[in-house]
Amino acid sequence: MLSTTGLPQGAVPKLERPGPLRDRVYEALLELITTRALQPGQHLVESELAGHLGVSRQPVREALQRLSTEGWADLRPAQGAFVHEPTEEEADQLLTVRTLLEAEAARLAAANAGAAAITVLEDMCEEGERAVAADDVDGAVAMNARLHAKVMELAGNTVLAELAAQVDRRVRWYYTPVARQRGRQSWIEHRELIAAIADGDGPRATEVMRAHTEHTRKTYHQRER
């Protein structure tokens, strides 16, 4: 059974100040889970986490309770806390909703994006391509999230953006284990998306984004376990 003792060197984020300690511990643990530094099913030992983060066990305990409430961790009687292991159905439902939200965002972005915004998207794409070429999975995942967030921003729909923000971290959680497998193809699809947005072609942008997110969903289900 994996425990938190074996966290990769440099994986534990520094706690930002100021802010309530329990919130900062929660954010740190959520980031470790999202990036899969803490793997699904891994035992979350309060004392070890407290030592890694340089805090007492109380804010860790409170953070674990919150993570449990939000579905990121499972509290098992007489065993402790464990990183939640998402079911295939959970992943499928989340990634299906993501497709709906992002396809609409792409359509709206095509109607709103100016030349400066297109340049930003192209720069992000170049950075993502460099990360893939360097086999920098964390960098590719982070840039993928930034690019999709930028498209959502360009959509100019606050409600849509709020809904997307609710699923963003889980999307990263599911995308991380398939990022290497998606590899360069994912960024080829990003290039096609940017071209459609630059042309102001809403239907095409919708189609490309829908296909792009569906590829990720199918790859997740076909991944090696």
Image (cartoon, rainbow, N blue to C red):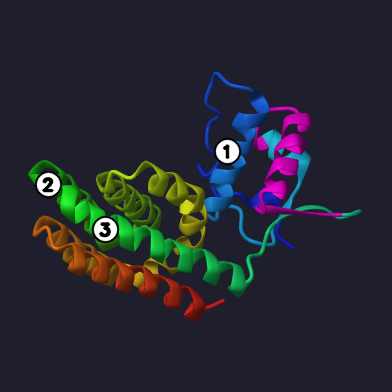
* Residue under label 1: 28
Percent x, y of residue 81? 77, 51
In the image, which disc is placed on residue 54?
none
Question: Rounded to the nearest whole Å, what is the CA distance between mark 1 and mark 3?
Answer: 31 Å
Q: Which residue is mark 2?
A: 119
Residue drawn at the location 50% of the way across and 63% of the way down: 174
| Residue denoted by label 3 | 106
Q: In the shown orientation, is residue 147 left or right of residue 111?
A: right
Which residue is pictured at 36% across the width and 68% down the height? Answer: 213
Q: Is residue 83 visible?
A: yes
From the image, give the main secondary structure of the stretch colored magenta.
helix
Q: Is disc 3 placed on a helix, strand or loop?
A: helix
Count all numbered tags in the image, as a single digit.
Answer: 3
Q: Earlier in the sequence, mark 2 or mark 3?
A: 3
Q: Residue extending furthest top?
A: 18
Q: In front of the other: label 1 or label 3?
A: 3
Amino acid type at image mark 1: Ala
For the question of whether residue 135 can be seen, the reply is: no
Magenta-tinted stretch: 52-76
Q: Earlier in the sequence, mark 1 or mark 3?
A: 1
Is residue 55 or residue 200 the one in the foreground? 200
* Magenta span includes 56: yes
Residue flagged by tag 2: what amino acid is it? Answer: Thr
Q: Earlier in the sequence, mark 1 or mark 2?
A: 1
